[in-house]
Image: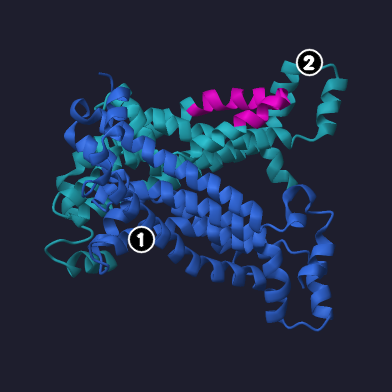
Amino acid sequence: MSLRDLAYQDAANPWFSWDYIRTNSSTILDALGEHVTLTAEAVAVAAVVAVPLAVVAYWFRPLSGPILALSGVLYTIPSLALLAFIAPAVGPTRSTSVLIGLVLYALLLIIRNTLAGLNQVPSEAQEAATGMGYGRWSRLFRVDLPLALPGILTGLRLATVSTVALVTIGALIGKGGLGNLILGGFRNNFFKAEITTGTILCVLLALLLDLILIGTGRVLTPWTRRAR
Amino acid sequence: MNVVQEGWVYLNDPLNWTNPGGILDRLGEHLVISGAAVGLGLLIAWPLGVWLGHSGRGGGLVVLLSDLTLAIPTIALLTILPLTFLGFGKPPIIVALAVFAMPPLLANAYTGVRQVDPETRDAARGMGLSGWQVLRRVELPLAVPYLAAGFRTAAVQVVATTALASYVNGGGLGQIIAEGFGLGISAAGGQILAGGVLVALLALLVELLLAVVERLVTPAPLRPARRRADREAVATGAA
């Protein structure tokens, strides 16, 4: 009954209302859909770019300093400033503007964690692989990358959770998925139910995607479970 | 005239700096909000983190808090808090940003106290120091590099995030960007870009400044490269 208590606390403008959800379900689902699409696209593009970059930094040591330094500086740039740089160039009414910013942030998290994972690969394993006649590429795909998988997955998880939260920034140009509900509720005469619905769905989405990635990680790296 | 030139013109117009609601006003708001948010975060996170680290409990709590704040969108807290008892204006914005400043402060304070060599701690105990004295004279001095690193992370993060206060008309440099988007990109593309440059420059400036401060307050022997070798000598020196 706690939800009902919550709903009747402030009859005119409740924090939570099933009524709002029922009457606006299509808007909410659209926002959720946009949110999931943006998150998935951003993390996927970032992963495709970041993992090879991390491998380059791993193979050519002198490059890892600059790559990490650049990622550190980029990470300092506020998300809103990034949107201000990108939107005038790409177009303010397109979700591509938001997507580019999201990819840049996700990129850095994945690069750092992948590189950390690769650097943790035991040298014994590498020497054994070399001794067995593995070349650079076959060692990468059969030894280095599989053993770095926990690090890569940590990067993907961090990137996914923070991307889910970051998508909402796009609400300033109307392309923020659930952020549109949060900001829309604020602008729409402080409509609390809309704000809360957007927020709760956002946090739940982050949690759900995180759980999915943890599950995938467990399936892909059975040896880490055996070790514990 | 392209957007970059328009942005340059905007930044070169002295009235854009000195007008009410101009760049200088916004910069002042930005610094006041950021400073208050970091200050509030410090007041809560440092004592809590140091105490948790000293007693060796609550490691899970620290992790949980940082995971949770990672998942909550900033603009959610920024829109929700003004509708609570805090009311509109600066207080809800400062509280919202302080929430996002807490995880790095808390985690670093906790780790800083936890990482103190158990042998050092035992030695201090053996010399007859009480728990409180061990904390004040051994653990805290040795945790300074971690506290400084946490402060730097939190401060830069808050300065960057304060830009989002503009979503709820909270002021700060982000307001220049948000007003630009309100006017439309064809009319105010230059203003949007100029605002972005200002916010990014401020964040980078704070990052550089605090990197120098972090180096200054870290006692030479505790600086990363030589930390391990000299730890024992420092412990006796600091105590």
Q: Nearer the viewer, mark 1 or mark 2?
A: 1
- Using a 10 Å C-alpha cutoff, classify the residue at mark 1 as few (fewer than 14 neighbours), some (14 to 19) or many (20 or more): many
Q: Position of residue A9 (x, y in %)?
A: 19, 69
Can residue A220 be seen?
no
Q: Chain of mark 2?
A: A
Q: Which mark is residue B223?
A: none
Position of A97 with respect to B50 (left or right) is: left
Q: Quadrant of the N terminus of chain A?
A: bottom left
Residue tagged 1: B94
Query: Mark 1–mark 2 contact, CB under 8 Å?
Result: no
| Residues drawn in magenta | A46-67
In space, the residues marked 1 and 2 are separated at their CA atoms by 56 Å
Colour of the chain lettered B: blue
Q: Position of residue A19 (x, y in %)?
A: 16, 53
Please state which amino acid type lies under the numbered disc 2: Gly
Q: Which mark is residue A135?
A: 2
Position of B168 with respect to A214 (left or right) is: left
Q: Position of residue B185 (x, y in %)?
A: 22, 28
Q: Is residue A63 magenta?
A: yes
Vertical position of residue B51 compared to residue B166: above or below:
below
Q: Residue at x 63, y 29 (%)?
A: A66
Closest to the observer: A109 or B166?
Answer: B166
Can residue B51 be seen?
yes
Colour of the chain lettered A: cyan
**SS category of the residue bearing label 2:** loop
**SS category of the residue bearing label 1:** helix
Toward the left, the furthest residue is A12
Closest to the observer: B15 or A9?
Answer: B15
Please state which amino acid type lies under the numbered disc 1: Ile
Toward the right, the furthest residue is A131
Q: Residue at x 15, y 61 (%)?
A: A13
Magenta part mainly helix, strand or loop? helix
